Amino acid sequence: MNLKLVTILLVEDEIITATTQAYKLIQIGHKVVIASTPGKAFDLIESSDYTFDLVLMDIDLGCELNGIQTAEIIITKHKIPVIFLTSNSDSEIIRQANSVSHYGYILKGKSHLVLVNAIEMAMQFGNCFISSDK
């Protein structure tokens, strides 16, 4: 696999899930920063400390904004590709997620290879359609 190594913002409110996912991505060379709330995600994106290539977004964040709403703001304001990670396979949730981002929707607990391939495809698609000026 010819995967470009990227800087990823992982937005996940469950710390054990976030840490496990980040560890797997770091093992293959990606840089991963974790945000547990939408507010923290916005702060990290707007800080000059990071330039994110991709956001991995949990849909149920357990707070005022869900992951779909948060992703919509990130995509609109910052033009960063978003891949959704969720344990919810409800068709209405999938439809809502797809209306915001076409970079991917992955059910948690599926093969790590599925996530790696989704990241690769998002980066290829993102390089074609999203300006590098964030």
Image (spheres, rainbow, N blue to C red):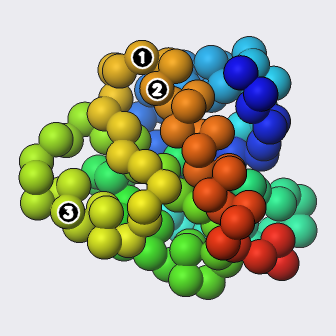
Q: Amino acid at mark 2?
A: Val
Q: Which amino acid type is marked by label 1?
A: Ser
> Residue at the location (41% across, 35% down)?
14
Residue pointed to by mark 3: 95
Q: How far apart are the alpha carbons under marks 2 and 3?
A: 20 Å
Q: Residues within 10 Å of mark 1 (few under 14, many from 20)?
A: few
User: Of 80 and 67, which appears nearest the observer?
Assistant: 80
Question: What type is the residue that disc 3 sits on?
Answer: Arg
Residue 108 vs 68, above or below: the answer is above
**What secondary structure is found at the residue carrying circle 2?**
helix
Residue under label 2, please give it: 114
Residue 42 x %, y %:
62, 69
Circles 2 and 1: CB distance less than 8 Å?
Answer: yes
Residue at x 77% of width, y 28% of height: 2
Q: Is residue 12 left or right of residue 42?
A: left
Residue 34 position in % (x across, y down): 63, 43
> What secondary structure is marked by label 3?
helix
Q: Are marks 1 and 3 in contact (CB under 8 Å)?
A: no
The picture places residue 75, in percent across and down from the top left corner, at: 55, 74
Q: Nearer the viewer, residue 52 or 18?
A: 52
